[in-house]
Amino acid sequence: MTGVSIVGAGLSAFGRQPGVSGREMAVQAIRSALVDAGLEWSDVQIAFGGSDGSGLADTLVAELGLTGIPFTNVKNGCATGGSALVSAVNAIRSGSAEIALAVGFDKHGRGAFAPLPEEWGLPVGYGEAGLMVTTQFFGIKIARYMREHGITAPTLAKVAEKAYANGTLNPNAWRRTPMSADEIASADMVNDPLTRFMFCSPGEGGAAIIVASEAVATRLGGRPVSLLSAVTRTRGFGTFEVFAPAIQGAGAPTSVSTVAAAAAFDAAGVRPDEIDVLQLQDTESGAEIMHMAECGFCEHGEQEQLLEKGATLIDGSMPVNTDGGCIANGEPIGASGLRQVHEIVTQLRGEAGDRQVPGTPRLGFTHVYGAPGISACTVLAV
Amino acid sequence: MSTTEPAPRLHGSRCDSCGNVAFPVADGCQRCGQQVMQPIELSEHGTVWGFTVQRFAPKSPPYVPPADGFAPFAVGYVELAEGVKVEAVLDCADFAELEGQAPVRLTAAAPVPRFEVVA
Ligand SMILES: [Zn+2]
């Protein structure tokens, strides 16, 4: 099987951009990835991409150039970018293309994500009773987790404090103002134990990744990063998901993130403890804590001690979300997964500037998780 | 004078093949994929599996606040003897009562399940 390399990575700006459409952000991200790769749009042989609510990716050819390539739309919630990337990788591996594009983008207004029960197969009563609130799920999950595994509230604040601190070091982040753990902890409670500054917000941005066969990557020169694996999974039986009227099965819920991460590590032939820099879905600070264990980076309950030692900081033993993650960059659903890959590529190339992980990181990992129980993971190497 | 209201019950399904219990009533089994499910009535008692407090009024629509206005309420999952955990509004005098797998009793089945702490 032919190896696959990332030869180009590009982002648009993240955060509020009045007057700029989601499609325009996607085009900016693609052009930036092409420049990064030293390629022209006409070199791209196949493309996959999508947004959750900001238009169809295949219409981007109107701006990019009508080269006639196959361009498949992907709509897969938080896994949109990951699914597009898996398709691009498979196109390279199958030999049907030597250069392929994955793109994700979104532009969500303030207060986006107003789900209706009908859209989730639930009786209207769930909306009338006030249960169609996404943040409740995160509150219930982390509250139980903290009771079970001895995690305390200050640790939640610490995760968000790190996100804002890393955001100040990232010129492309939306939130670039530091915030103290005290300020985060004492902010309005949204759903106990999570305050408003512990959540990411619906955001705006585009991200693009160009993959190529190893032969092409070698020919191009540049600074290729090996994509050792890219995996997406839907939930198995017994998981706990947003807007679930019940959690089926006895005992502790299972996790789609655990399954996807294990599959990504298995396919890459890499262990979690070998990873030098990682991205974990941080929809809110509790999610980052739980995903550390769900993805295999520590035991359940070990997180508090690890954070006490600064393990997840940029200069820690397992730096998490060095670009500020979703909390500092916002959550444009279609773009987040590829934004993560972009950050790991940047770190593995040693080009992350003020937020560069020290030493020479060799192995990186990305993880997204979202409704209705999907996860996408990658393992990257230089 | 007044007729006695029938006690509320939650209706679910049990898989003929693997015994998995689903709520609400389901045509197929999430665990084994078989499509023979028997209707069952779920336990009226359970314990609080997890919960949070809704501190701000949810967006209306779809939310319909009570006549006397919004007040923070608890929402969570109640673990039943059947193994399934059911999402519900949780009534209590003080949210702290819900800690520690508090025993709860079903008080309403619709529009959403509602349980209250057993004193
Ligand atoms: Zn079954």
Image (cartoon, helix red, strand yellow):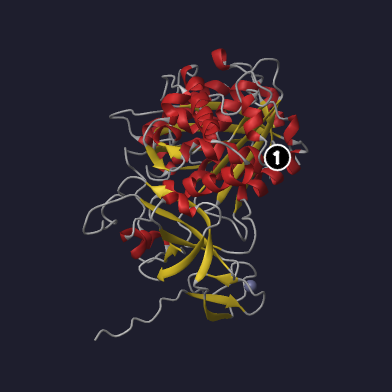
Vertical position of residue A167 compared to residue A21: above or below: above
From the viewer's side, name the closer residue of A52 and B42. Answer: B42
- Check disc 1 and give the amino acid type: Glu
Q: Assess disc 1: are there few (<14), some (14-19) or many (≥20) residues with their C-alpha within 10 Å of its C-alpha.
A: few
Please name whichever residue, A324 or A221, is drawn nearer the observer in this view of the structure: A324
> Could you say which is closer to the camera, residue A12 or residue B11?
B11
User: Which quarter of the figure has residue A309?
Assistant: top right
Outermost residue, top direction? Answer: A354
Residue A114: x and y in percent read 34, 49
Q: Is residue A206 above or below residue B29?
A: above
Residue B5 in percent (x, y) is at: 34, 81
B56 left or right of A134? left
Relative to B31, is A287 on the left or the right? left
Q: Quadrant of residue A200?
A: top left
Marks counted in the figure total 1
Q: Going 27% across and 51% down the picture, which residue do you hit? A: B70
Image quarter for ligand 1 equals bottom right
Residue at (49, 19) in percent of width and height: A170
> The C terminus of chain A is located in which quarter?
top right
Q: Quadrant of the N terminus of chain A?
A: top right
Residue corresponding to mark 1: A299
Please say whether residue A120 is visible from this viewpoint: yes
Which residue is most to the left? B67
Q: Does A216 sit above or below residue A104?
A: above
In the picture, measured across the screen, residue A191 lies left or right of residue A211, that is left
